Amino acid sequence: MIYREQHAAALSEQWDTLAVSYFQTREFLSYLEKYNPCRQRYYQLFRGDRLVAGACVYSLSLSLLTFSSIPSPLGMQIVGVPCSQSSPGVVGAPAAAALLLEDLVRQERGLLIGLNLDRPLPVSDVQWGRTLPAVVLDRTLSGFDDYARQLRSSYRRRLQRLDHAWEGVVSERGPCSRFDRQMYGQYLDVFAASDAKLEKLPYEVFPNLPAGFSLTTHRLDGKLLGWHIGLARGDEYVFFLVGLDQATKIQYHTHANVLSCVIREGLDGGARRIDLGQTAEVAKTRAGGRLVEKHLFAYHRLALFRFALDKARSVLEYGHRVPDAHVFRQES
């Protein structure tokens, strides 16, 4: 049986046993309902008393042709987690998830987009394509110093040049409650400059993030060069959100230095896997990350719309390919 719920608090206690990331849990979904409300609703597939699959759906106006840099705002229903993060909005084993989606796509009205699935699933009449890949660093390393030692000489020299450009910068890690309007302005600047605009988060999301998230600010002589928010959970560290001062980011190589700081925080904190996020793949692979393919699907009840989606697949999906960087002396 498939049941639909309007609030995460009403989801089965078994939901979290299917979640593979904190961003899919009932706790975080409830937090998003409060601070990023977008008509969230949830579907659950049960076999007897056992929950075998679930999905989060929300409504938003997004650019359908975002990966082609063509402005195309359109209201749609999205199967995903509404927080600009690479976790899929579907939980459960692939076979059960496919059964749930088979029913879900016919219940939702209008254009339906599914984001960040790990693989295409056998669901009738949906169009599949690539979306932004995730970038992860999951090499066995004992800390940041070990990371630096294992880099090839050219990348180690690059890291040294970044350190030189960052001389005098004070990085301070603390609770997200320190987040302020200046930082939000830097987030909006990064969002505006992005080639793949998906959703813009409201200010309230940032200072109210749950325990476990941390905010690291980067200042030079008191000037805020940028900041990042990360989540340390178990043996994983997630690079969640970032803001940069646009006027100084080239001079101080701010984005690359923030990535280095993220890797340092993760490795020195004992993380065995660092999720570097989905954008800026070239910079992140040059920092040692590897690409993890992600997939999207599109569906509409009307056959004419489905025909158009099929013909427009090349501009709907993410077509950029990033070559391997071969960063480490001995690739594992």
Image (cartoon, rainbow, N blue to C red):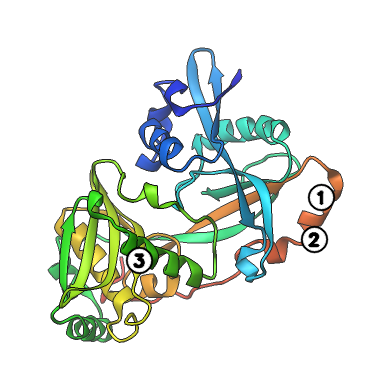
Q: Nearer the viewer, mark 1 or mark 3?
A: 3
Of 303 and 17, nearer the camera is 303
- Whether residue 95 appears in this view of the structure is yes
Q: Residue at x 22, y 86 (%)?
A: 161
Q: Residues within 10 Å of mark 2 (few under 14, many from 20)?
A: few
Horizontal side of 162 relative to 11 (left or right) equals left
- Percent of width and height locating residue 9: 42, 24
Horizontal side of 153 relative to 206 (left or right) equals left
What is the number of callouts on the image?
A: 3
Number of the label disc, if any, that sits on residue 305: 1
Q: Residue at x 60, y 52 (%)?
A: 296
**Amino acid at pointer 1:** Phe
Give the image quarter of residue 45.
top right
Q: Which residue is mark 3?
A: 243
Give the mark nearest the N terminus, 3 or 2: 3
- Whether residue 138 appears in this view of the structure is no
Give the mark nearest the N terminus, 1 or 2: 1
- Look at the image and tell me in which quarter the C terminus lies: bottom left
Instruction: Work out whether 319 lies above or below 89.
Output: below
